[in-house]
Image (tube, helix red, strand yellow):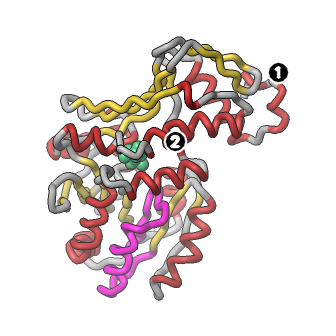
Amino acid sequence: ATQLQNQQPLTAMDASTSQFYDDVLSGLTSTPKHLDAKYFYDARGDELFQDIMNCEEYYPTDCEMEIFAEQTAGLVNALKADGTPFNLIELGAGDATKSIHLLRGLLDAGVDFTYLPIDISGHVIDSLNETLPAQLPGLQIKGLQGEYFKMLKQAAAGSDKRNVVLFLGSNIGNMPVHEAEDFCKVLHMHLSTGDMALIGIDLKKNPKVILDAYNDKQGITKQFNLNLLDRINRELDADFNTNQFDHYPTYDPETGACKSFLVSLQDQQVNIGGQAISFIKDEYVYMEVSQKYTLEQTRSMAAGACFKPVKDFYDSRKWFLDTIWIA
Ligand code: AVI
């Protein structure tokens, strides 16, 4: 917040807006420029992401939904393990549309578990606490709002049951590979022997299929990226003209990195809360990575974090993997 101390809008900013401002300014004064994809998800960004998930080209959600809807019994069997009660902790639960199949399956099989969805958004947690018990009678649920690992620690510390952690939706793909590896190591450190993780990972496939998923014909993914500029306008008193930026999605089949950029269409200056930022024509802003893996790469990631893979679930096209690891 130091950068802000002499700026006009500071007084009006709460801590999270001030953090947003700092991150935006530090990203846009770096070379090359970048923004943090975690800021995509304001109310409008959530709506646009829903639209992405519903658009024809975006396959990951359909693939993982197919796994959860059609292989529920297999998932239940693998996770119930020796039948001892467990905490089912979901990192970034969202609206739980996929996990609801698993929750129903576990309840139908009479498995003893408590569902602990963790999300950074209090709104998400309130709505899960309210809607899920009505949809799934008998469900024991305790939603936790906050940072993943902080809440995971809290969830695990409050109980002597084993833990099963869900990290679905290829959210791990939004970390660069080395960060994903570190994430798995930190996850392992928070778990005890016999605890499990079920991780949703998008696999390498025909590069065109992947690029199309991040370059939909309706331009929703483009709007999703541009919305971050609009959000900066709305929340940080900025004056981006989104017509002066284009969306540039890329996929490199060698590295498996699917990256998106915004490209400045002209020399321009943008004012963000009193701070002027210059863009030259054709300059890019790195927005997001959606990393794709091979099965072998997921195996080394598991091994590097001291997890042992126990069971893999694929959709019928083998485009997506939900893999269960044991600590
Ligand atoms: C949330 N996350 C897994 C999505 C993905 O596929 O990387 C976000 C997204 N970005 C563009 N389209 C979807």
**Of residues 98 and 216, which is closer to you in this image?**
216
Image position of 232 (left or right of 178): right
Q: Position of residue 270 (x, y in %)?
A: 66, 21
> How many numbered tags mark residues here?
2
On screen, 91 above or below 267?
A: below
Residue at which label 1 appears: 6
Image position of 226 (left or right of 231): left
Give the residue type that dot 1 points to: Asn
Q: In terms of image quadrants, where is residue 127?
A: bottom right
On screen, 180 above or below 28?
A: below
Which residue is painted at 39% across and 58% down in the image? 54
Distance Cα–Cα, label 1 vs label 2: 27 Å
Task: Say if disc 2 is inside 8 Å of ligand 1.
Answer: no
Give the residue type that dot 2 points to: Lys
Residue 232 is one of the magenta-drawn residues: no
Give the magenta part as a residue range: 86-114
Quadrant location of the N terminus? top right
Sequence order check: which comes first, mark 1 or mark 2?
A: 1
Q: In terms of image quadrants, where is residue 112?
A: bottom left
Q: Position of residue 259 (x, y in %)?
A: 36, 32
Residue at which label 2 appears: 38
Image position of 205 (left or right of 121): left
The answer to whether one can see residue 225 in this image is: yes
Mark 1, secondary structure of its residue: loop
Q: Position of residue 254 (x, y in %)?
A: 19, 29
The answer to whether one can see residue 303 in this image is: no
